[in-house]
Image (spheres, rainbow, N blue to C red):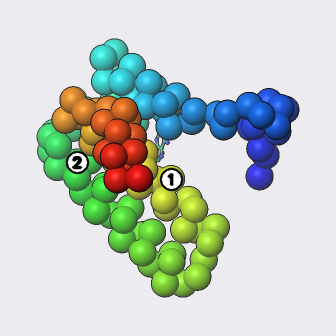
Amino acid sequence: MSDPDADRGADAPPEPVLDDLFATIESRKAELPEGSYTASLFTHEKGENAVLEKVGEESTEAILAAKDDDREELTAESADLVYHLLVLLAMKDLDVDDLRGELRDRF
Ligand SMILES: N=c1c2ncn([C@@H]3O[C@H](COP(=O)(O)OP(=O)(O)OP(=O)(O)O)[C@@H](O)[C@H]3O)c2ncn1[C@@H]1O[C@H](COP(=O)(O)O)[C@@H](O)[C@H]1O
């Protein structure tokens, strides 16, 4: 697995991948481009249930991977879960800063 931070210098902050991903999700929400999976979640005939079902499904898949001690699968399913959770936040007009703020407040 390649490390996107490898040539950023030892003191560089980690790549803000969650912010970049969230910005892409917001852009898909605003522009609804053809062929975008993210856009399809915002326009789904099931409404918000489409993304809610995916959050539940990916959560279950992450649990099963953990029970199997499959760390690679757990990493992949966790990424699916986080992505769908970010889409859900965007759908509810929340953003990654709301999530960051909530986590920071508990620190
Ligand atoms: N991170 C993700 C991401 N994670 C998961 N997924 C999609 O989430 C779906 C996961 O569903 P499953 O694992 O159940 O697989 P599936 O059976 O193919 O899915 P379904 O048919 O059940 O919907 C797949 O279609 C994945 O492609 C994602 N789709 C998009 N992104 C990011 O969003 C960006 C924009 O994507 P588009 O909106 O497609 O342009 C991409 O560049 C990525 O950075």
Q: Nearer the viewer, residue 34 or 100?
A: 100
Q: Nearer the viewer, residue 40 or 17?
A: 17
Indicate the position of residue 30 as horizontal and vertical percent values: 30, 17
Q: In this rendering, is residue 58 above or below 101?
A: below
User: What's the CA distance linking mark 1 and mark 2?
Assistant: 18 Å
Residue found at the very far top of the displayed protein: 31
99 relative position to 83: left or right: left
Q: Name which residue type carries label 1.
A: Ala
102 relative position to 1: left or right: left
Q: Is residue 46 visible?
A: yes
Q: Viewer-nearest of labels 1 and 2?
A: 1
Characterize the local packing of mark 2: few (<14), some (14-19) or many (20 or more) Cα atoms within 10 angstroms.
Answer: some
Q: Nearer the viewer, residue 39 or 64?
A: 64
95 relative position to 72: left or right: left
Q: Name which residue type carries label 2.
A: Ala
> What residue sits right under mark 2 in the picture?
50
Indicate the position of residue 29 as horizontal and vertical percent values: 31, 24
What label sits on residue 79 in the rendered view?
Answer: 1
Indicate the position of residue 53 as horizontal and vertical percent values: 24, 57
Characterize the local packing of mark 1: few (<14), some (14-19) or many (20 or more) Cα atoms within 10 angstroms.
Answer: some
Residue found at the very far bottom of the displayed protein: 68
The secondary structure type at the circle numbered 2 is helix
Q: What is the quadrant of residue 37 in the picture?
A: top left
**CB of mark 1 near ligand 1 (< 8 Å):** yes
- Ligand 1, seen in the image, is in the quarter at top left
Indicate the position of residue 43 as horizontal and vertical percent values: 22, 31
* Residue at x 57% of width, y 62% of height: 75
